Amino acid sequence: EKFAFDLFIEAQNILGQNIPRPPEYGLNRDATGVIVQPQSLVEISSESSQIIPSIGIVIDF
């Protein structure tokens, strides 16, 4: 019988480049956190140039 166990560590976006993503939206709020009426959407800024670490496990049997 064959059995294989692989464990790996991966770092994505190691160069810190911007990752293309569609814009995200949220409800517009005032300084106290209350939703502004009428409900309007605002674009949420998202920094997507971070390094993404991950751990993987592969089991073959």
Image (cartoon, grey):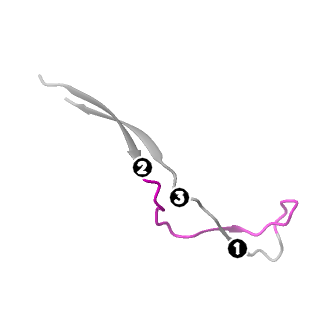
Q: Could you tell me the amino acid type at mark 1? A: Leu
Image: 21 above or below 52 = below
**Image marks 1 and 3: residues in contact by CB distance under 8 Å:** no
| Residue in view at x 81 percent, y 77 percent | 38
- Residue at the outermost right position: 32
Q: Position of residue 10 (x, y in %)?
A: 37, 41
The residue that label 1 is drawn on is 41
**Image marks 2 and 3: residues in contact by CB distance under 8 Å:** no
Q: How busy is the neighbourhood of tag 2: few (under 14 within 10 Å), some, or many (20 plus)?
A: few
The residue that label 3 is drawn on is 48
* Among the two numbered marks 1 and 3 on one chain, the one whose residue lies closer to the N terminus: 1
Q: In whole angstroms, how far apart are the C-alphas of marks 2 and 3?
A: 12 Å
Secondary structure of the residue carrying numbered label 1: strand
Q: How busy is the neighbourhood of tag 3: few (under 14 within 10 Å), some, or many (20 plus)?
A: some
Image: 58 above or below 42 = above
Image: 15 above or below 18 = above
Q: In the image, 56: left or right of 49?
A: left
Q: Which residues are magenta?
A: 14-35
Q: Position of residue 25 (x, y in %)?
A: 64, 69
Give the quadrant of the C terminus: top left
Q: In whole angstroms, how far apart are the C-alphas of marks 1 and 3?
A: 21 Å
Q: Position of residue 9 (x, y in %)?
A: 37, 36
* Among the two numbered marks 2 and 3 on one chain, the one whose residue lies closer to the N terminus: 2
Q: Position of residue 34 (x, y in %)?
A: 85, 63
Secondary structure of the residue carrying numbered label 2: loop
**Image marks 1 and 2: residues in contact by CB distance under 8 Å:** no
- Residue at the outermost left position: 1
Q: Could you tell me the amino acid type at mark 3? A: Ser
- Count of numbered circles on the image: 3
The residue that label 2 is drawn on is 14
Q: Nearer the viewer, residue 47 or 27?
A: 47
Q: How busy is the neighbourhood of tag 1: few (under 14 within 10 Å), some, or many (20 plus)?
A: few
